[in-house]
Image (cartoon, rainbow, N blue to C red):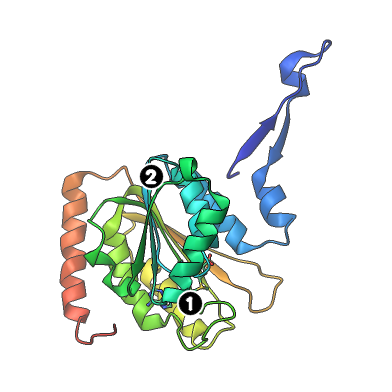
Amino acid sequence: MLHSIRLATRSRTSGWARQCKTRTALVDEFYRQGARLTSLSHLLWSDIVRPGDTVLDATCGNGFDSVVLARLCGRQGNVLCVDIQEQALASTKAHLESVIPLDERPHIEYIHESHCRLDHFVRPNSVGLICFNAGYLPKGDHTLCTTAATTRKALDAAAQALRPGGMLSVLCYIKQTGGTDECETVRSWMAALETEEFVCGHMEVLNRSQGPQLFSAWKRDDVSEERRQRVAQKRARAKKKRETQNVC
Ligand SMILES: C[S@@+](CC[C@H](N)C(=O)[O-])C[C@H]1O[C@@H](n2cnc3c(N)ncnc32)[C@H](O)[C@@H]1O
């Protein structure tokens, strides 16, 4: 079970133990809400992000995910909000500033860039959580959309940027134009990661036709530095081989 919230009430007759009821956030915030994968992703993140972490929203859009990240990393943390649209960055900024009081707000950077260039603004092994919520800006221009090629390139950079114990979270929508291709790309990219370095998972709601797909890759924190370096060198060689086309 992902999370347990212990609700305890003291009773004169039975004491703590017998009065303890365990209610799970998974049931309350995911299943009872109609199995929204955004809620599930937020639950996963809450097990990963530590106070003071640097976190990165690679498709910040209207800032709903950035707000969750900002609350999780807290005042000492750093949130990097990335989007190719200025309109999205402005919307994220307005949202963050309206719901998180100044004295609780982490350091926030708004980066007007493609996430393909993620390695230009984060150092390797430095980020606790990187999320992608693929697609286009709701009510915005549907042509300004993530693609299989750009997401693929960004994932390579994101894998390097994660700290051990950090997580990559990717939500894909197969109903959108190019969505099936993007989902398949993410699935095969994660499936090819070294098991000694990453543990990858996939979730979909089976009884919802063409629903979104949630992928997560957890960077293991129980691998020796020597082993990690060998895997990284192997990955860099494979990347160099693949880099024949520039997608950004
Ligand atoms: C579904 S929205 C994200 C929703 C957002 N996470 C939220 O909580 O409101 C997808 C966003 O990805 C952005 N996007 C598309 N391609 C991008 C790229 N290559 N780099 C960065 N952002 C991109 C779009 O501009 C859009 O704002």
Quadrant in the picture for residue 7: top right
> Which quadrant: the C terminus?
bottom left
Amino acid type, label 1: Cys
Is the residue 3 above or below the residue 97 in the image?
above
For the N terminus, the quadrant is top right
User: In front of the other: label 1 or label 2?
Assistant: 2
Closer to the chain start, of discs 1 and 2, is 2
Q: Position of residue 42 (x, y in %)?
A: 55, 54
Percent position of residue 243, x then y: 20, 81
| Residues at marks 1 and 2 touching, judged by CB atoms closer than 8 Å | no
Residue 247 quadrant: bottom left
Left/right of residue 172 with respect to residue 165 in the rendered view: right
Q: Is mark 2 within 8 Å of ligand 1?
A: no
Mark 1, residues whose alpha carbon is within 10 Å: few (<14), some, or many (≥20)?
many
Q: Given the current orientation, which residue lies at the most extreme top position?
A: 12
- Nearer the observer, 239 or 60: 60
* Residue under the point 51% across and 55% down: 97
Q: Which residue is mark 2?
A: 77
Q: Which residue is mark 1?
A: 183
Please indicate whether residue 232 sits to the left or right of residue 145 in the image: left
Placement of 178 over or under 101, stated as above or below: below
Residue 232 visible (yes or no) = yes
Q: Pinpoint residue 242: horizontal percent, then vertical percent.
A: 22, 80
Q: CA distance from mark 1 to mark 2?
A: 31 Å
Q: 84 or 221: which is nearer to us?
A: 84
Q: Quadrant of residue 111?
A: bottom left
